[in-house]
């Protein structure tokens, strides 16, 4: 059960936002790296995870990206559960069709520690759209995630609203997810949604920081005898 909880949290932290964000890709020849720390509070479970990632646009219409995370510790009721290790590896590609629309293709490769990860590959495909206004950037996406070995499919509809206030950019996110298990014996269905908010601050043209809080609600994210998950993330970005 604990492995399932940790793996679900890893899925939320990677696949749901694997394509980096819902906005247009970087210009050709430009890239970005990120380093982040995330606390997950799902009473009685608390975890601390570090993440690093990089994205790069080798062509004007294509962006490549990958992320790597490491679970530093897992506490249950304040006691060390001695569960830590490398997470699975999300990689992907995003194709910018025009100024508004993009297609993304992601995979989570099972290279991580077997004690805290599922041992099969997860795929996601989707399309994103953006509307840019004077002081508002509105990104949205529709994606489908496949767990082929387990006959699980998750459909998600996500939105992000960035309020553009110069160097300071507060934002809000919402994601609705619906999961289907189409196993050989019976079908099952679950749904859930994510509510989050955060703020980005540009220190220089190249360096920015981001703090966010994300709340996961609904039976898709429920775990036996655990509270609904809450994720707190602090990230530093560098563009090159």
Image (cartoon, grey):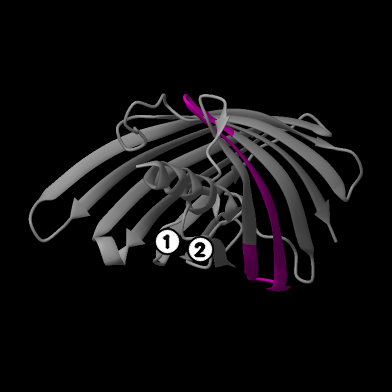
Left or right relative to 88: residue 27 = right
Q: Is residue 51 left or right of residue 189?
A: right
Q: Residue under label 1, please give it.
A: 124
Could you say which quadrant of the image residue 85 lies in? bottom right
Task: Mark yes or no: residue 135 visible.
Answer: no
- The numbered disc on residue 104 is 2
Determine whether 229 is above or below 235 in the image: above
Does residue 138 sit above or below 150 in this rendering? above
- Residue 191 coordinates in the image, percent (x, y): 29, 37
Image: magenta residue range: 40-66
Query: Visible in this render: residue 227?
Result: yes
Q: Nearer the viewer, mark 2 or mark 1?
A: 1
The spot of residue 109 in percent (x, y) is 49, 68
Asked whether 47 falls inside the magenta stretch, the response is yes
Q: Position of residue 40 (x, y in %)?
A: 56, 33
Task: Kindly report the distance in space between the C-alpha atoms of the residues bearing marks 2 and 1.
Answer: 8 Å
Please tell me in which quadrant of the rendered image residue 203 appears: top right
Q: Residue furthest bottom?
A: 59
Q: Within the magenta stretch, is there residue 50?
A: yes
Residues 50 and 172: in front is 50
For label 1, the SS is strand
Up/down of 150 relative to 76, above or below = below
Callouts 2 and 1 close, C-beta under 8 Å: yes
Say which quadrant the N terminus sits in.
Answer: top left
Residue at coordinates 63% horizontally, 54% vertically from top-left?
A: 69
SS at circle 2: strand
* The label number, if any, that marks residue 149 in the structure image: none
Q: Main secondary structure of the magenta part?
A: strand
In this view of the protein, which residue sits in the foreground, 196 or 102?
196
């Amino acid at each position: 059960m604990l492995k399932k909880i940790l793996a679900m949290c890893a899925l939320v932290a990677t696949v749901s936002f694997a394509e980096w964000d819902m906005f247009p890709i970087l210009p050709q020849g430009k890239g970005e790296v990120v380093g982040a720390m995330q606390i997950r509070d799902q009473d009685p479970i608390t975890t601390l995870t570090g993440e690093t990632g990089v994205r790069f646009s080798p062509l004007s219409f294509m962006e490549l990206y990958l992320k790597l995370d490491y679970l530093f510790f897992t506490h249950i009721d304040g006691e060390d559960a001695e569960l830590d290790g490398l997470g699975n590896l999300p990689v992907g590609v995003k194709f910018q069709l025009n100024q508004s629309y993009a297609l993304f293709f992601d995979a989570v490769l099972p290279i991580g520690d077997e004690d805290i990860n599922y041992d099969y590959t997860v795929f996601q495909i989707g399309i994103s759209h953006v509307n840019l206004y004077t002081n508002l950037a509105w990104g949205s996406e529709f994606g489908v995630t496949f767990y082929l070995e387990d006959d699980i499919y998750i459909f998600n509809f996500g939105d992000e609203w960035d309020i553009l206030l110069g160097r300071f950019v507060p934002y809000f996110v919402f994601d609705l997810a619906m999961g289907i298990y189409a196993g050989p014996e019976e079908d099952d269905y679950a749904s859930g949604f994510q509510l989050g908010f955060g703020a980005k601050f540009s220190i220089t043209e190249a360096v920015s920081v981001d703090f966010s809080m994300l709340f996961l609600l609904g039976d898709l994210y429920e775990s036996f005898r655990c509270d609904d998950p809450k994720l707190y993330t602090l990230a530093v970005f560098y563009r090159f």
